[in-house]
Image (spheres, helix red, strand yellow):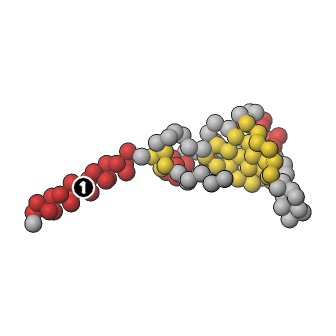
């Protein structure tokens, strides 16, 4: 009986070691300074003045109907900024590396 308990404890400690080796995107974002990303309501000009030119500006999406506003997305090395028309609606931290666990990419 004691051998079974020992095997279970060893298995659980191995799982804990594996889980602690991974960095969760959520944990890193909680630890980072919120001032390092654009705030909701900032204009495109304010974002560019404070953080510089984005590494990539993706094509706008939406806008086909009045109820669907045009969304612009700018990629920076550490985060991605989403704009509705000219204003920031959200800024999201990017994964730091392949070992960081975060949301699964959308299937196209």
**Which residue ends up furthest to the right in the rendered image?**
66
Location of mark 1 (residue): 11
Quadrant of the rendering where the N terminus is positioned: bottom left
Whether residue 4 is visible here, answered yes or no, is yes
Q: Residue 19: x and y, percent?
A: 37, 51
Q: Circle 1 sits in a helix, a strand or a loop, which is it? A: helix
Residue visible at 81% across and 48% down in the picture? 60
Q: Residue 14: x and y, percent?
A: 27, 51
Q: Residue 56: x and y, percent?
A: 73, 36
Residue visible at 14% across and 62% down in the picture? 4
Compared across the picture, whether 98 is left or right of 5 comes to right
Q: Is residue 80 above or below residue 84?
A: above
**Which residue ends up furthest to the front in the rendered image?**
108
- Rendering quarter of residue 47: top right
Residue visible at 68% across and 49% down in the picture? 91
- Rendering quarter of residue 67: bottom right
Q: How many tags in the picture?
A: 1
Compared across the picture, whether 70 is left or right of 80 comes to right
Q: Residue 6: x and y, percent?
A: 15, 58
- Graded by Cα atoms within 10 Å as few (under 14), some (14 to 19) or many (20 or more), the crowding at tag 1 reads few
Residue visible at 32% across and 53% down in the picture? 16
Frontmost residue, 8 versus 81:
8
Q: Is residue 13 above or below residue 47?
A: below
Whether residue 30 is visible here, answered yes or no, is no
């Amino acid at each position: 009986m004691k051998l079974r308990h020992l095997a279970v404890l060893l298995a659980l400690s191995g799982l804990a070691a594996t889980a602690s080796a991974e960095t969760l995107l959520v944990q890193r974002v909680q630890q980072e300074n919120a001032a390092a990303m654009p705030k909701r309501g900032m204009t495109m000009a304010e974002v560019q003045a404070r953080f510089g030119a984005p590494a990539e500006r993706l094509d706008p999406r939406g806008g086909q109907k009045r109820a669907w506003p045009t969304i612009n997305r700018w990629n920076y090395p550490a985060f991605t900024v989403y704009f509705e028309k000219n204003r920031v609606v959200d800024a999201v931290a990017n994964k730091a590396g392949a070992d960081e666990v975060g949301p699964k990419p959308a299937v196209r």
